[in-house]
Image (cartoon, helix red, strand yellow):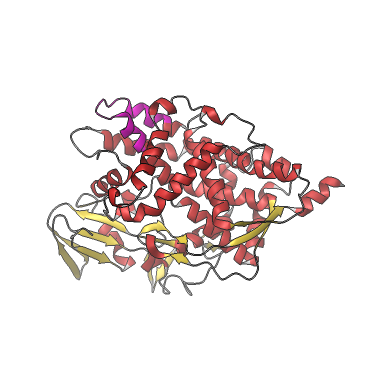
Amino acid sequence: MEGKYMTFVMDPLLYPAVIKHGKQLDFHEFSDTAASKTFGYPAVCTGRFPGLSDKIHRLYQLLQGSTLNSLSHKMMENLQDVLQKDFLSVHAEGKECEWRQEDLYKFCERVMFEATFLTLYGRPPHTNIDAHLQRESWIEVLLNNFRKFDAMFPLLIAGIPIGLLGKTKSIREQIIRFFHPHRMAEWTSPSEFIQARLDLFEQYDTLKDLDKAAHHFAVLWASVGNTISAGFWCLYHLLSSPQAFSVVRDEIIGMFGDKEPESILSQDTLTQEQLEKLIYLESAINESLRLSSISMNIRVVQGDFCLHLNPHFSVCVRKGDIVALYPQSTHLDPDIYPNPQEYHFDRFVENGKLKTEFFKGNQKVRYYHMPFGSGATMCPGRFFAITELKKFLSITLLIYDMQLTAGQQHATMDKSRAGLGIMLPANQIFFRYRVKKNTIQRQRL
């Protein structure tokens, strides 16, 4: 990585020895440098912005705990709104019982991107048109630009100058301008998290308006860059396993009830407390993340020292070197997960509860599931991401009959993003869906 020496720690039993050295093995400076170059704002870990980095990190508390409940409520409302557009358009055409075919990834992308944006940032004023008659063009433009930028994301993180990547710089500028503070001031109902960031940035005269906008763009990428892919793999694995699909959907119906689509799309459903009781759903999500996450946990050595990994082994590292954990080696370890390449939706269920203890040999593995990183550097939005996945899967399983289109090859992973999180699918996967037939028939009786 940019000429740095890297030490990979592959044994999960040694991970705690690395993670406990939070001061000597730091992630934040590396992350700040990489993100600032990628998203186009000045690095915050400098004297130009005293205290800004710490204040930004403290605001992530607004993505968990009690404030997560209001975010969860808003996410459900926006998922309902986005899916209701599909439902009403089909209902108006009298095609409720007909199957529709769509690219599974693009389905997850368009639903989750819009719902996430509305939940976090609120609604721009020019979107107040009849959404049931015409899809709002602003979200299509934003999504299209986001998609083009995201395709170049691995190269930007690798340090390739943006000027060498075709139109990527102009696309990034278009997205950043979309988040200009003067524009965002007109948006209605932003989340408490985004409003707090807006207020914080106003305290720093050294931050230009486009710098602030670039920070908001970075949060957009962080909120959907991996979550959309995670949604795809979760839904794909459920559709690929009739048993998993049946058990998980029955669990959701048992919690919420077998109601008509109109009721599901118009009422607040599935509270945070109810979501936490959906053990098989959470296990299915964990299993999909285990299989699709190829992340790398980076630590930068802050000064020369000897890293003691266990009583019998240590490695000397120098200031500026990289120490890296590679969680996929844990996720695919057959000693921890028997038949690790296979999808078992209930792998994380034991005695009717979520399983939280895994062993390698006779030793307990503390860090056995790491799609969101580890220690103090864990993704601060992980609780929101899991809540979003649960609600997305729950509402789609409640209102739709779904099945993979016959005659397709299995989904494979695009390894070009290895080290950066959840992999995208390398090949197109199509599925068929329709409003649940039994609810339509019951409604007409």
Q: Nearer the viewer, residue 366 or 369?
A: 369
Q: Nearer the viewer, residue 383 or 38?
A: 38
Q: Position of residue 381 (x, y in %)?
A: 42, 45
Instruction: Evaluate whether residue 49 shows in this view.
Output: yes
Q: Nearer the viewer, residue 136 or 325?
A: 136
Q: How many marks?
A: 0
Q: Is residue 91 above or below residue 50?
A: below
Instruction: Using residue 71 as the reference point, say whether residue 171 is left or right of it.
Output: left
Range of magenta residues: 195-215
Q: Position of residue 40 (x, y in %)?
A: 30, 41
Q: Position of residue 193 (x, y in %)?
A: 42, 34
Could you tell me what secondary structure mostly forms the magenta stretch? helix
Q: Position of residue 94 (x, y in %)?
A: 78, 46
Residue drawn at the location 41% of the way across and 51% of the way down: 150
Instruction: Evaluate whether residue 283 shows in this view.
Output: no
Give yes or no for residue 298 being in the magenta stretch.
no
Report the quarter where the N terminus lies: bottom left
Q: Nearer the viewer, residue 408 or 334?
A: 408
Instruction: Using residue 239 as the reference point, say whether residue 117 is left or right of it.
Output: left
* Outermost residue, front side: 166
Residue 180 is drawn in which quadrant? Answer: top left
Q: Is residue 207 above or below residue 141?
A: above
Give yes or no for residue 204 being in the magenta stretch.
yes
Instruction: Using residue 319 as the reference point, say whether residue 236 is left or right of it.
Output: right
Residue 249 is drawn in which quadrant? Answer: bottom right
Residue 350 is drawn in which quadrant? Answer: bottom right
